[in-house]
Amino acid sequence: MKVLVVAAHPDDEVLGCGATAARLAEEGQDVHFAILGEGITSRHGQGSDADENQMASLHQHAHAAAEKVGAKSLELYNLPDNRLDTVPLLEVVKIVEDLIERLRPEIIYTHHAGDLNVDHGVVHRAVLTATRPVTGQTVREIYAFEVPSSTEWAFQQLQPSFRPNVFVDVARTLELKIAAMECYKSEARKFPHPRSPEALRALAVRWGSVVGCAAAEAFELVRSIRLQAD
């Protein structure tokens, strides 16, 4: 089984499904990460020179995080941070289509459409467009994940609201997610920020308590197709 995680920014892949990715990798699945946005330039004045050293460092952190959770590959793109709504959607779709053509994944994890961050919504729509269920489409399942400090900060004022209906027991791999997040030295935050280790553990415990396990990651099923064998 091949699994592709399509994220907008470095660290979204870990925040959204890092423990699930680690569990899938441990179970022998091929997990691939793709991060479409460069993740840094919105922190500077628009039009200023991008800090190449900071970007290189952030991308090194992404590789370290991918290694922590056992991802088989990581692809980094340089779409403008927090400005994906200024990029023609077709350009984003073409990136995802190319990934699907090369990797041939059966399952995709990506952003939820109702997140506060505009880039998340663009990536979600691009994934849906690139995975239109036409003959020959390899993707059979699509799951939307939550990203702490974006999904809940929409306060259900943006539609659709995140309504998880699939839960993955990650009690054994939660600490791999925490360790992967710690690779992102520039992105980690102290408690009570939602991206702090304490808050990430609390979120996993909360979802675990909802479904009767010690820790879980929550997803919203977008689409699942079961075809008959030839």
Image (tube, rainbow, N blue to C red):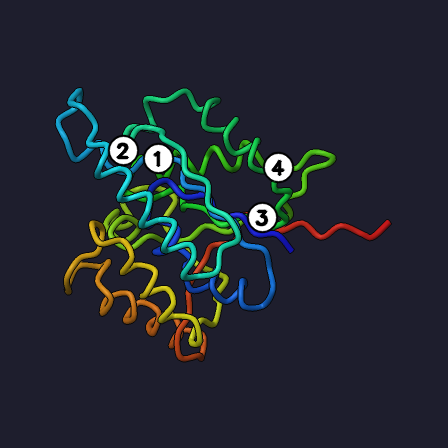
According to the picture, the residue beneath numbered tag 2 turns out to be 82
Q: Residues within 10 Å of mark 4 (few under 14, many from 20)?
A: few
Q: Do the residues labelled 1 and 4 touch (CB within 8 Å)?
A: no
Where disc 3 sits, the SS reads strand
Where disc 1 sits, the SS reads strand
Q: Quadrant of residue 15?
A: bottom left
Amino acid type at image mark 1: Gly
Q: Which is in the foreground here, disc 4 or disc 2?
A: 4
Q: Are marks 2 and 1 in contact (CB under 8 Å)?
A: yes
Q: Which is in the foreground here, disc 1 or disc 3?
A: 1
Sequence-wise, the earlier of marks 2 and 3 is 2
Q: Residues within 10 Å of mark 2 (few under 14, many from 20)?
A: many
Relative to 50, does residue 57 appear above or below in the rendering? Answer: below
Where disc 4 sits, the SS reads helix
In the rendered structure, the answer to whether residue 39 lies left or right of residue 228 reads left
Which residue is depicted at the point 22% across and 54% down?
Answer: 185
Q: Which mark is residue 102?
A: 4
According to the picture, the residue beneath numbered tag 3 turns out to be 223
Where disc 2 sits, the SS reads loop
Q: Residues within 10 Å of mark 1 (few under 14, many from 20)?
A: many
Q: Where is residue 79 in the image (x, y as percent from the top left)?
A: 36, 29
Which residue is depicted at the point 38% across and 37% down?
Answer: 121
Amino acid type at image mark 4: Arg
Which residue is depicted at the point 35% across and 49% down?
Answer: 62
Towards the viewer: 207 or 73: 73
According to the picture, the residue beneath numbered tag 1 turns out to be 37
